[in-house]
């Protein structure tokens, strides 16, 4: 998995394919190659590998969840939801598939179901990265329903959960999205001063984000 750690997915796929050629029943290599295909935006190939793992009865919650991610990336939300649901059935205390299923529900405009899934994720893991993501996405769902006060509360909580900016791990780095989303919620709610303040904070983090300049203008 050296190339995977380096995010050199092309070389990782090459080596994993060699391993699978030698042993076609190597479900671990199939699962790892599926991940590399997904990260390379090769969603059909990812689905194919995860399906082979699952059909061999070797699939776990991660295989179902990642196959769901691939289906969602293709716009096949019904299949995505089925896979996220299966991942939840296997590991009901894992927050990630609730967030992913909630996003798929949101993609379909089913915001009440999305909010329920994001809320469950928050109940399971309210802090740090997972909590930040869940609050941010739940805020977006509330905003789509016109519940701006709830959206503002959630975006504010997502910002509170931002990590120390000195943390260099890209997984835990600060994200600009909650600041932008909070600004939009304030803007939609007619609170223009607060909106400008959050757009300014977003631009401090990402000065070339054209959409923020447009909204602030």
Image (cartoon, rainbow, N blue to C red):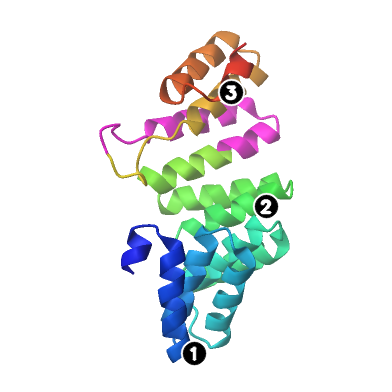
Near-viewer residue (179 or 216): 216
Q: Residues within 10 Å of mark 3 (few under 14, many from 20)?
A: few
What residue is at 45 percent from the left and 73 percent from the top? 14
Q: Nearer the viewer, mark 2 or mark 1?
A: 1
Task: Report the span colored magenta.
Answer: 139-167
Image mark count: 3
Near-viewer residue (81 or 150): 81
What residue is at 52 percent from the left and 81 percent from the top? 53
How far apart are labels 2 and 1 at the CA level? 35 Å
Q: Contact (CB < 8 A) between labels 3 and 2?
A: no
Q: Is residue 21 left or right of residue 217?
A: left
Q: Position of residue 151 (x, y in %)?
A: 58, 31
Q: Determine the secondary structure under disc 3.
A: helix
Residue to which mark 2 is pinned: 105
Q: Contact (CB < 8 A) between labels 2 and 1?
A: no
- Decide which of tag 1 and tag 3 comes sooner along the chain: 1
What residue is at 65 percent from the left and 53 percent from the top? 104
Q: Position of residue 119 (x, y in %)?
A: 53, 47
Residue to which mark 1 is pinned: 24
């Amino acid at each position: 998995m050296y190339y995977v750690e380096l995010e050199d997915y092309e070389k990782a796929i090459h080596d994993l394919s060699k391993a699978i050629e030698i042993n076609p029943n190597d479900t671990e290599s199939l699962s790892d190659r599926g991940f590399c295909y997904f990260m390379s935006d090769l969603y059909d190939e990812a689905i194919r590998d995860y399906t082979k793992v699952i059909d061999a009865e070797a699939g776990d919650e991660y295989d179902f969840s990642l196959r769901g991610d691939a289906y969602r990336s293709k716009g096949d939300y019904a299949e995505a939801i089925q896979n996220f649901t299966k991942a939840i059935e296997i590991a009901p205390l894992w927050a990630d598939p609730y967030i992913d299923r909630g996003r798929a529900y949101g993609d379909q405009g089913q915001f009440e179901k999305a909010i329920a899934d994001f809320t469950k994720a928050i109940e399971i893991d309210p802090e740090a990265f997972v909590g930040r993501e869940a609050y941010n996405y739940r805020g977006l769902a509330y905003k789509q329903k016109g519940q701006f006060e709830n959206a503002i509360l959630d975006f504010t909580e997502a910002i509170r959960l931002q990590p120390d900016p000195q943390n260099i791990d890209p997984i835990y780095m600060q994200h600009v999205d909650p600041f932008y989303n909070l600004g939009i919620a304030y803007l939609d709610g007619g609170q223009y001063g607060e909106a400008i303040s959050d757009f300014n904070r977003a631009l401090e983090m990402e000065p070339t984000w054209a959409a923020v300049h447009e909204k602030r203008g």
